[in-house]
Amino acid sequence: MSDGSTLTRSERLLRACRGEAVDRPPVWLMRQAGRYLPEYRAVRAGLSFLDTCRDVERAVEISLQPLRLVGTEAVILFSDIFVPVLSLGIDIDFQPGPVIATPIRSVDAVERLTEPDYEASIPYVFEILRRLRAILEPEQVPLLGFAGAPFTLAAYLVEGQGSRHFAALKRLMYAEPDVLRVLLDRLTEMTVSYLNAQIDAGAQVVQLFDSWAGILAPADYRRWVLPTHRAIAERVDRRRAPLILYVNDGAHVLDEMAETGADVLSLDWRVDLADAAARVGRRASLQGNLDPCALAAPPDAIAKMVGELARAAAPARGHVLNLGHGCLPETPIAGVRAFTEAARKLAEPGGR
Ligand code: CP3
């Protein structure tokens, strides 16, 4: 199997992440479990989002839905980047985005956060992972864990909710940098221990979502974000589980991303994959990067775009086919199926 042919789904993803030979890119989709699936809405019926995350049976079922229904080749834990934040003693409500009743804007507020004890406060996350791994191991389907990156978590915690300009967050950056520094340090510690706990519970690959780091100028990114990514890449047990780093809107910081030590750089559709492959070289594999809205195209057009992405990424150390951001509630199911089917056909003669 060392030549990369007849690989299991687990081998294909792990090898692509580490830059070893594969027959074709593995495929999964960010935010693959969720509102675009009627089966998700049926399992959720009557339950709040957080209660669904806490309900082990339902969360396991929702995590498996994309594998069974739309042909993705990896399963990602059903949860949210704000679940571990509950362990810090912060109250969060989903409306549907996260809302924090008392935003964190002072060193005092950071110091009042509790020391996380995940097994005590959010045991369901690890139980979901253990059950998923037991189900997926015989099928040789890989299991992904994930966490929000410190900057993205801080953005919501400081603003109290999502925002267009993140003015309160940027005010801290420029006017009270010590507050943001202690908050980011605290969240970096949390993220390292949370991802390692997920690896202990069975996650074989972990993805760090930095959805908002792209709002920063390159110099601010280097000062505030890069050290958090580096610390996480250094301290997460990447020998047991490769680390995927996703930065939304991060074309202007690709070189910095390549310096973090992450195994895979997950890119949005604003980046040309051939260009990224040339710039990143052997330092990391690439993941991405179809515009999620492109899944509205007819199946043959989706297949053509998948072929183009695979060809563009071919010089990269490894390539994991994915979207450039998460599935949207309006994503057509037929488009998701066409995407995963096109990926499988890449292995056929003349498939590229
Ligand atoms: O990928 C998966 O299928 C696993 C589950 C997952 C969810 N959220 C479930 C969810 C993952 C990996 C996330 C990550 C997440 N959550 C991010 C990073 C990725 C990104 O999209 O940029 C962010 C920024 C959040 C915060 C968050 N959670 C927002 C902004 C929202 C509301 C709007 C939206 O995007 O859906 C949520 C709620 C949420 N998280 C839902 C789901 C399925 C919708 C809840 C519902 O069904 O009402």
Image (cartoon, grey):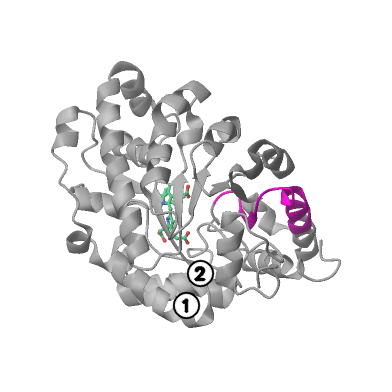
Residue span colored magenta = 306-325
The picture quadrant where one finds residue 168 is: top left
Q: Residues within 10 Å of mark 1 (few under 14, many from 20)?
A: some
Find ligand 1 in the image and state its quadrant. bottom left
Please rate how many residues cluster around mark 2, counting C-alpha atoms within 10 Å: few if below 14, some from 14 to 19, many from 20: many
Residue 116 percent across, percent down from the top left:
19, 51
Question: Is 149 within the magenta?
Answer: no
Q: Earlier in the sequence, mark 1 or mark 2?
A: 1
Q: Nearer the viewer, residue 169 or 49?
A: 169
Measuring 45% from the left and 47% from the top, which residue is drawn there? 209
> Quick check: 223 left or right of 315?
left
The kind of residue on which mark 2 rests is Pro
Q: Is residue 269 visible?
A: no
Report which residue position mark 2 lands on. Answer: 142
Residue at screen point 16% across, 42% down: 113
Q: Count the numbered circles shown.
A: 2
* Up-down relation of residue 181 to residue 197 (above or below): above
- Which residue is the site of mark 1? 136
Q: Percent x, y for residue 226?
A: 44, 33
